[in-house]
Amino acid sequence: MKKSDFFYHLPDALIAQKPLPQRGSSRLLQLGKNTGTIKDGQFSDFLSLLQPGDLLVLNDTKVIPARLFGRKASGGKVEILIERLEQSYQALAHVKASKAPKADTVLILANEEICRVIDREHDLFRLRFETISPLPALLEQIGHMPLPPYISRLDDSEDLDRYQTLFAKHAGAVAAPTAGLHFDQAALDKLAEKGVARAFVTLHVGSGTFQPVRVENLAQHVMHKEYFQVPQGTVDAVLQTKRRGGRVVAVGTTAVRALESAAVSGALNAGCGDTDLFITPGYQFKCIDALLTNFHLPESTLLMLISAFAGYEAVMQAYQHAIAQQYRFFSYGDAMLII
């Protein structure tokens, strides 16, 4: 398939700029896998759609306040988006400035401490932070939540809570696993009381999740790498669920990529590392039976992934339905359950 096969026109008014007042108050579009059957509802319906013995697999990554503002010694403004922490005082980052900084350029941060450009790795810059605090602590002090580029406002105090799942545990993501944002504690408790089990994977979502596919031929696309970990307890939970006839329900495309990356051999195995798995229509899924997800950008790798799972025609028709019904799109938007 081609990149242009995954284009759709979305009115700007449907891009959610803020979260709803309450988690769990979003809408839920139910899509029949491969059948294309569509049903409109509320996220609160999710509880009734799962059965005792089903397994939810959630991504417990934690978003770090990865956006920093500063200036060059010359006075020009600089915006830094940390992509990956390499050491306590070193990171790979995107640097937005009027002119790309060269090696040894000094960048002055908002607290007047500095970082220095060491070298460049493709689109990323390797930075060394010559600061009193190690980088994780520095980000907590002066960092901003890295809202996606389609949210046309600066982050505020509300985002510190709402752009983070309730079960976030392992710091390292620079974008939220957004399907998990819909769950409040009451919903998690009710699912547990119903007999729906939970297991966790970790996939540190990178800013590459928002990068456009730049080639028409999908076979030529180079996927960004993200760190993932699938623990043995999650492997055991998936296998036990399959044996008892339950369904494995992935919460978000990041949970899917973690599970499928751990099953590239054909069998699901515990492990960790970097994944550049690119899932497109024709891919044979090994782990999941259902998928809860948000609505994704046109021509994005995430839209291609859900098309691989639910069927291309079914997904594109569902998106047109969602637009006509004025669902809210993207990170702070509504949800879709493919089941």
Image (cartoon, rainbow, N blue to C red):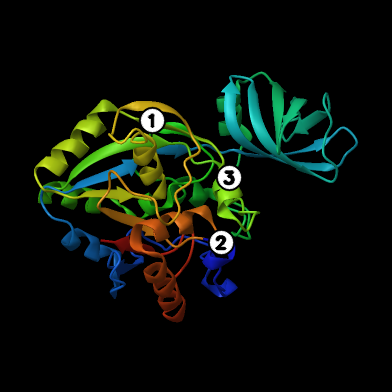
Is label 2 in a helix, a strand or a loop?
loop
Residue 208: mark? 3
Which quarter of the figure has residue 168? top left
Give how far apart the Cα atoms at labels 1 and 2 are: 31 Å
Dot 1 or dot 3: first in sequence order is 3
Which residue in the structure is indicated by mark 2? 2
Is label 3 in a helix, a strand or a loop?
helix
Residue 73, image x, y percentages:
87, 32
Q: Are marks 1 and 2 in contact (CB under 8 Å)?
A: no
Q: Within 10 angstroms of label 1, few (less than 14), some, or many (20 or more) residues?
A: many
The kind of residue on which mark 2 rests is Lys
Which residue in the structure is indicated by mark 1? 229
Q: Name the mark nearer the viewer: 2 or 3.
A: 2
The kind of residue on which mark 1 rests is Gln
Which quarter of the figure has residue 95? top right
**With respect to residue 40, does 195 lie above or below?**
above
**With respect to residue 309, does 9 lie above or below?**
below
Q: Within 10 angstroms of label 2, few (less than 14), some, or many (20 or more) residues?
A: few
Dot 1 or dot 2: first in sequence order is 2
